[in-house]
Image (spheres, coloured by chain):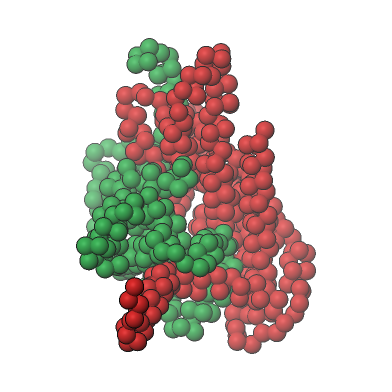
Amino acid sequence: MIAVTPQRNSSLSLWQNLGRRSFAYWLIFPVLLLILGLNLYPTIQGILTSFTNQSLIDPSHSGYIGIDNYFKLLQDPVFRVSLGHSLELTFAAVLLQVILGLIMAHLLIQKVPGIHFFRSVAMITWVLPIIASVVMFRFITLPNYGLINIVLKELGLAPLARNWFGDEKYAFLLVLIMHLWRNVPFYAIAFMAAMQAIPADLYEAARIDGAGDWRQFWFVTLPNLRYIILVMVVLHVTFTFNNFDFVFLSTGGGPVNATEVLPTYIYKQAWNGYALGYASAGGVIMLVILVVLVLVCNKFIKGLSEQ
Amino acid sequence: MKGAFPIRRLVTYFGLSIFYVFLLLPIAWLVLSSFRNSDSVQSGRLIPASSELTFQNYVETFQISNFVTYLVNSFVIAFSVMLLTVFLGSLGAYSLSRFAMKGKKLFMMAALLPQFFPYVLVLIPFYVLMSSLNLVDTHVGLILTHSSLTLPFALWMLTGYFNAIPVELDQAALIDGCSRLGVLFRILYPVAIPGLVVAGFFAFVVSWGDYLFVSILSQSNQTQTLPIGLQTFMSSLEVRWGLITAGTVLAIIPTVIFFSIVQRRLVSGLTAGAVK
């Protein structure tokens, strides 16, 4: 009824109101500043750099050269080899990780004595620094006193012993194996958690309909894991395609480019070859491929679910 | 079903043993070798004699100049990243979870999108940016860098955690005279501890293990961390695998201890958003 408010108070409440509204923005401001400033801004800057001849020797002087860098890249045989390796590695690693992850999850969900131990140590490979994993794999594959060669000799298979990382045929396989070693348990644990959330009566109904183990897995388990599979695939396509550490620290891309992937190729162009513009163009190609890969995964798995 | 299918149980153990030999053998071999003297490591025998076991590798690792520096740098940087990530991440998540504001979806997208950008592309302008801010070869530069890598996940995960906490709790506290920041620290923090721990652990692991950004931003042992140190060991101490393995064991101990503490919560934390 009495709607008379003193002028001073109303302006104060307006001020408070403004403060209240902007409070939420102030809370999120530091996070956005860090993420956008240190990730988004450099990426946009990197796309611009890819059209210049910027060099690490004198970064402040560079000129616009259009799409020359892209032309040169596509003609570079090492770039093409690296691109092939990156795609092969990503495809093979993610596919095998999903399959092995499903198998391991299926084992971990069994209620056998001691299963809690297996569940609790599973993720250990995922939390270790990648350099530590590389040291372990370099160490067990050493030519003279690595574990693998020792065991081969004990088994009387000495001719099979070799310098594994130095062998063109096996180095790439070892990089793939290191990716599996690190990530399969993460898949398994994530799938296991999702499997435990599937209502038991779905299996009950399937059994009544006469479905065996395999059909239960195919028609009950798998459809219920679609979403988590999609999340893991997208996460790991990104991780594997972008990963620099495994290759750079274990083989440096060798022997004779046998393990060269896009991240290591681009890194070397920038920091050893000083060609920042050229390297950026390689990075932009990676970005485009990655966007396409993620969209394809999304489509593919969504398509599966609508069957 | 207990004991009903011994064959099934046998198959399970057989499958598990294949997976776990593959997963744990490299770690076990590393730890065992770190306690062997160099003759023993190079003997090509699987099982060392007890006289060949020694702590010498660990003693020598600490005597190598720089190892302690690497260790201290790694600790300082990873702990700061952990604290910064949890603090700023929870502020952002509080904002996204509890306040109506314009552009919420856009903020979320903008925060998550950079997760998909190739690091090698980010790195080049990033280095130019850091040198213009005079942050190359500083702890602060590395802490901010690593935080920018860990914050998107923390923001995403903590927002999910906060969303699951009933708003009635906040309202009751506000009526009792609690400030809006007080609601975050006194009401949401205690309930969301599992989420905060997982976000912090994730940040620690990322920072502790990062090689790529440190290799560009660190130019002296003022700021170099363990991954750089181990890589240097591996290339310069080529034949002294006793030292390399001991250094590696020392570098993974903090992660393993931290992991064993949060392990139960890690699974639910990492997959929380995905499983629901």
Seen from this angle, which residue lies furthest left? B176
Q: Give me the residue at 76% from left, 63% from top.
A: A74
Task: Work out which quarter of the rendered image holds the N terminus of chain A and state it.
Answer: bottom left
Q: Of residues B63 and B144, which is closer to you in this image?
A: B144
Residue visible at 30% across and 59% down? Answer: B171
**Residue A228, position in %: x, y?**
52, 41
- Give residue B248's quadrant in the image: bottom left
Query: Which residue of the protein is positioned furthest toward the front in this rendering?
Result: A1
User: Considering only vertical position in the picture, is B28 above or below B234?
Assistant: above
- The residue nearer to you, when weighing B155 against A89, is B155
Q: Which chain is green?
A: B
**Chain A, hue in figure:** red
Q: Quadrant of residue B154?
A: bottom left
Q: Is residue A283 left or right of residue B245?
A: right
A26 lies above or below B32: below
Q: Please report the residue visible at 56 percent of the width from the left and 15 percent of the height from the top.
A: A209
Indicate left or right for A252 with B224 as reference. Answer: right
Q: Position of residue A124 (x, y in %)?
A: 38, 44
